[in-house]
Amino acid sequence: MRGRTFARAVFPVLLCLVAVFWLVWGFMVWPVSGKSLLTLLSVLIAGEIIRRRCLCRQPARLTGDKEGFPPEGHTGPVVMVCGDVDDEMFASGPGRGTAEGWFLRVTSLAELITLAGELLTHTPTMAGQLCVMFRCLPDRHEDEALMRASLKAVRLQMKQLSRLTGYNVPMVLNAEFSGPETPWIVVRGDSALVCRDDEPAISLCEWQRSAQTATVQPLLTEANAMLHKIVLDELGKPDRLCPPIRPFAVTLRFGHIRSCATALWPQWLFRQTRISPSDRVSAYERRWHFADPVLPLLAPYTTPLQGGKTGRRVVLMLLLCALGAIALSVRHNQALIHKVSADLQRWQAIPMNHYDPKAQALHALQQDALLLERWQRQGVPQRYGLALYPGDRLWLAVQQAIDTYVPPPPPPK
């Protein structure tokens, strides 16, 4: 694993270094001393980059195992769970893996960017697999202002996460309410599904038609109203510091969870319906708190990047070297065309009876023809290549001009 990490840190840098050498020694016409100095500088810079990449990767690999990071071969969504997260949810460790995705605990909102940075240092291609799940438990909040402050904080973290990854990371709003136990309800756009354990998902309308849901209907209506009026309202508010967030999906369920009479949800429910939630508390399995049904919806939108940020930088570097080589090749060919054209114009401007200047112009054309013929036999120099070399046309024009030369008459006897 150590050699693999070292190779992953070194190979992109060496590839870029080879491209720079190709550009410097193949297309630049600097003196050898200048090229050597530039080569030495490139090697030093590459060595420093490799050193930093190796130092960054080794600690990340060690902390990755300790912090419950997903394995390197994981290709599903990586859901970073933040908000109202407790030890009960992640009782067996900070990470939970399933066949369809991986949940990773974020201890506090302030650690979201740090955790994402360590994860991407460990496996850069996972930048495309990241998703944020904000867990909201209105039964544990007594102050609406503090709850809105946490929502504003997650907006700021999402903005910084977008800067880190280079794209808008999807966010899932996860909510649990005290009340009669229900399956997970997943709302995505205009579609709402009820996902029962070990049974196919059905639409919310179909589920509501069953007699068993009569007692939960008022609670579901008020939970929906509360989410829109407080949570979604705060996430979508215009703000000059951070853009509004539209959740990728909303997952909610009811159950016999801990609550108190002064919490936001019991107060809201009693104020709207005069219903008081039951004080009953059940000890659910750990997986009861994880919205696993949302993972298949996330899968098409959270896929591994091909090369990640490092791959994009390597491609950009190779592209810049290729464009630089083309630009230098064009410049060298323009200089060659200008030189040969100047010799031809001088040849044409000198009358044939001006024998000494004409002989000098002829010698210049002959040197041009010899150079072009040698390149034709031995190969065109790389700096004139890239399918831009006009040697055949120039040689023909020079040879036609040479063929028109009339030597001076012999001196009289």
Image (cartoon, grey):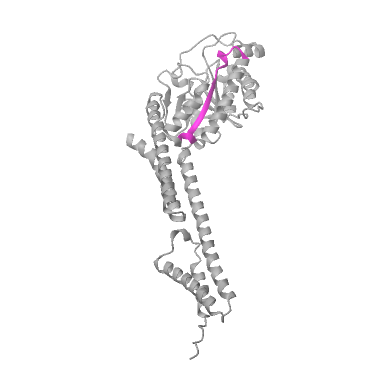
Question: Which of these two is toward me, 16 or 234?
Answer: 16
Residue 342 part of the magenta segment: no
Magenta stretch in the rendered image: 126-144
Q: Is residue 405 above or below residue 371?
A: below
Q: Would residue 68 be found to the left or right of residue 350 on screen?
A: left
Q: Quarter-wise, where is residue 229 in the image?
A: top right
Q: Quarter-wise, where is residue 136 in the image?
A: top right
Question: Residue 182, position in %: x, y?
Answer: 53, 20
Q: Which residue is drawn at 56% across and 14% down?
A: 139
Question: Residue 162, position in %: x, y?
Answer: 55, 32
**Res. 206 visible in picture:** yes
Q: Which quadrant holds the N terminus?
A: top left
Q: What residue occupies the far bottom of the structure in this picture?
A: 413
Residue 131 part of the magenta segment: yes
Question: Which of these two is toward me, 273 or 49?
Answer: 49
Q: Quarter-wise, where is residue 69 in the image?
A: top left
Question: Residue 177, position in %: x, y?
Answer: 56, 17
Q: What residue occupies the far front of the structure in this picture?
A: 413
**Res. 209 visible in picture:** no
Question: Residue 349, position in %: x, y?
Answer: 59, 74
